[in-house]
Image: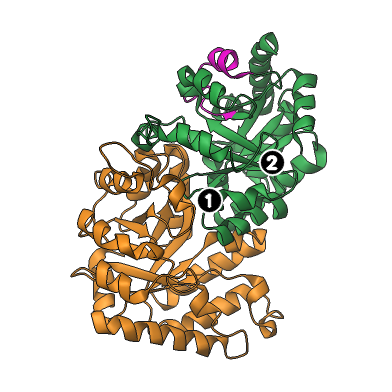
Chain colours: A orange, B green
Amino acid sequence: MNKQQLISEIKRKKSVLCVGLDTDITKIPAHLLGDEDPVFAFNKAIIDATAEFAVAYKPNTAFYESRGLAGWASLEKTIKYLNTNYPELFTIADAKRGDIGNTSKMYAEAFLKTLDFDSVTVAPYMGSDSVQPFLEVPNKWVILLALTSNVGAQDFQFSAAGEGEKLYENVLKTSQNWGTPENLMYVVGATKAAHLKHIRSIVPNHFLLVPGVGAQGGSLEDVLENGLNTDGGLLINSSRGIIYASAGNDFAQAAGDEAKALVSVMKRYL
Amino acid sequence: MNKQQLISEIKRKKSVLCVGLDTDITKIPAHLLGDEDPVFAFNKAIIDATAEFAVAYKPNTAFYESRGLAGWASLEKTIKYLNTNYPELFTIADAKRGDIGNTSKMYAEAFLKTLDFDSVTVAPYMGSDSVQPFLEVPNKWVILLALTSNVGAQDFQFSAAGEGEKLYENVLKTSQNWGTPENLMYVVGATKAAHLKHIRSIVPNHFLLVPGVGAQGGSLEDVLENGLNTDGGLLINSSRGIIYASAGNDFAQAAGDEAKALVSVMKRYL
């Protein structure tokens, strides 16, 4: 998917909502456990209930890999379902990959070709040649970690990286030589909304994927206020707050309601 | 596997050789392609031909994920084969994972429990709580990226991280508060053998996983000279140099010969 297609969908729905499919088989409603593939059945119901509100979906690969082959099968079915039934939605493999060039090329193959996601999250530690192979796939995106939403972000991301610059600032600045706002986005944690305004000044035109709204404590209004640009320019992710809105038979309806509530706030800003 | 078991195997074989199973289906001998699972058939033959020389095996997850479900099945069969037939060998999932706490916990589940590798490589960018869940699994290991062997290592790993310290040095020092030499190793690229002596002074007792010998240009003698400690303390990886030593019917024999040649150098130092 290209940038213009993503922007159209954002403007059409007045939404920058991304639904995080961090589907934990131990947390899904009991009545689904008899299904041949409970995780896919759950994802399918969540997607169908939230697709009129969301513009993006983000399965987190860890939750699938933890179940081995069965989990990988659920992941394949989920992305295929999204691509077949909702081709207008942006898809993100939240995989946090990154390795030497020949290996990153294989990861690009895995997520952007074999599974056919629109984008994949990538860790910056190994530098340019670990990111480049993902950027080379036409019409696909890298979403590079800049500032994350967890406590450990303090350990290295805020360390001084020369010239009074912090590491996450260095990552934002350096990586702008690798890709463009047409194929490169950044992960910026919402618990650091105070930093969003500053980050937006460094990367005025790039999309920012903002996790950490909801369960991790970030404020939706703060993110919208400080992060939006004329394209929208944000994908605000909620995982647990939506997908586990109810543990009962009404889980899909509850997820839809929660997505709708988030989007009603977004509409005020978009 | 605990540290003492690993050291015993190193001393018994006078070897610190790790065989990297970066198995690319487009590069394996044609006569295997008729097999039900050509990648597993290849890995099995390579393992059987090299196990008397090596102390560790390191499948690189990217090469398996690039083939989707079929690739993940080859990975499962490979680790099961190693654990069943060669329980004395140390196994490494070269996965370069790392995410917020609840997600890293799922990756720990995937690699250290479901697949049952002895260790997994982890990227440090997201800090302490992204690494901790892996360290909490008993008798398993984290191998944390410190200094990598690729060109992009220059982008951030060498950036100043306060107090005249480089980022990779900061990673080595900070992470020593997270784990011990009993559950934490470091990735140190062999193309930076000049830095190995310095790194050894920062982490005298930790094992170092050293990729980049061979195809990536690092010198085996330099690594041994600067990296060994009284435990051995190294796992020196060779992937392409061993597994693609021959593209013919004799590929396994050629891999064994190459492993034997590397170990004959190691014996002089161990």
Q: Seen in the image, is B70 located left or right of residue B62?
A: right
Q: Which residue is mark 2?
A: B41
Q: Nearer the viewer, residue A105 or B106?
A: B106
Density class for disc 1 (Cα within 10 Å; few <14, some 14-19, many ≥20) is many
Q: Nearer the viewer, residue A199 or A259?
A: A199
Q: Is residue B88 located in the magenta-colored stretch of the structure?
A: no
* Rendered view: A110 above or below A88: above
* Rendered view: B198 above or below A218: above
Q: Seen in the image, is B223 located left or right of residue A48?
A: right
Circle nearer the viewer, 2 or 1: 1
Specify the farthest residue to the front: B163
| Residue B176 in sight | yes
Seen at 25% across and 57% down, the residue is A198
Q: Can you give x and y, in whole percent of width and height, for residue B69 in the image? A: 59, 57
* Rendered view: A210 above or below A255: above
Q: Seen in the image, is A82 located left or right of residue B71?
A: left
Looking at marks 2 and 1 on the same chain, the residue that comes earlier in the sequence is marked by 2
Considering the image in quadrants, where does the C terminus of chain A appear?
A: bottom left
